[in-house]
Image: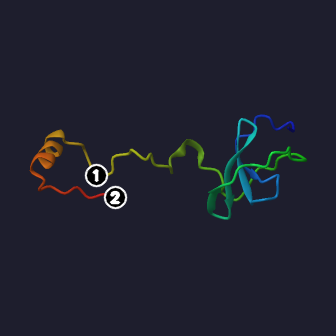
């Protein structure tokens, strides 16, 4: 490996297979990106040549992650356990899925 042992984030794919490849702890991952399309492609079983080049052009999330949402984030207001229980028991209440 190169001196980029602490690489974390999107880098130009040093294998030349994709536009960018995610590195974690200095190791290439299977997460790749071509333009705005992300996919999984395991890195080859060979070392790459040269130094890593950090990807540019808005590839990294903003500082603090304020623009990111958690998958379990409540988007429908406050949770009311009575409403949930009533819905299960009588089956008449429909909750929209966002």
Q: Position of residue 27 (x, y in %)?
A: 75, 39
Residue where numbered disc 1 is placed:
76
Residue where numbered disc 2 is placed:
98
User: Which residue occupies 18% across, 45% down?
Assistant: 84
Judge whether 2 appears above or below 75 on screen: above
Q: Are marks 1 and 2 in contact (CB under 8 Å)?
A: yes
User: Which residue occupies 63% across, 57% down?
Assistant: 39
Q: Position of residue 29 (x, y in %)?
A: 70, 45
- Screen quadrant of the N terminus: top right
Judge whether 5 appears above or below 46 on screen: above
Q: Position of residue 96 (x, y in %)?
A: 26, 58
Earlier sequence position, callout 1 versus callout 2: 1
User: Which residue occupies 22% across, 55% down?
Assistant: 95
- In the image, 90: left or right of 55? left
- Using the numbered discs, state the Cα–Cα distance from disc 1 to disc 2 in whole angstroms: 8 Å
Q: Quadrant of residue 35?
A: bottom right
- Screen quadrant of the C terminus: bottom left
Q: Which residue is situated farthest in the right direction here?
A: 50
- In the image, 38: left or right of 71? right
Give residue 8's mark.
none
User: Which residue occupies 46% across, 49% down?
Assistant: 69
- In the image, 41: left or right of 1? left
- In the image, 65: left or right of 32? left
Residue in the foreground of this view, choosing between 61 and 80: 80
Residue in the foreground of this view, choosing between 67 and 88: 88
Q: Position of residue 73 (x, y in %)?
A: 38, 45
Q: Nearer the viewer, mark 1 or mark 2?
A: 2
| Colour style of the rendered protein structure | rainbow
Label 2 sits on a secondary structure element that is loop
Tell me the crowding category of disc 2: few under 14, some 14 to 19, or many 20 or more residues within 10 angstroms, Cα based.
Answer: few
């Amino acid at each position: 490996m190169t001196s980029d042992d602490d690489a974390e984030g999107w880098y130009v794919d040093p294998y030349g297979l994709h536009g960018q490849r995610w590195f974690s702890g200095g190791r290439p991952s299977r997460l790749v990106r071509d333009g705005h399309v992300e996919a999984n492609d395991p890195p080859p079983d060979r070392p790459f040549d040269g130094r890593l080049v950090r990807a540019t052009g808005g590839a990294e999330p903003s500082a603090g992650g304020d623009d990111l949402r958690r998958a379990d984030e409540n988007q429908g207001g406050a949770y009311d356990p009575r409403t949930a229980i009533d819905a299960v028991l009588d089956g008449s209440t429909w909750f929209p899925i966002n």
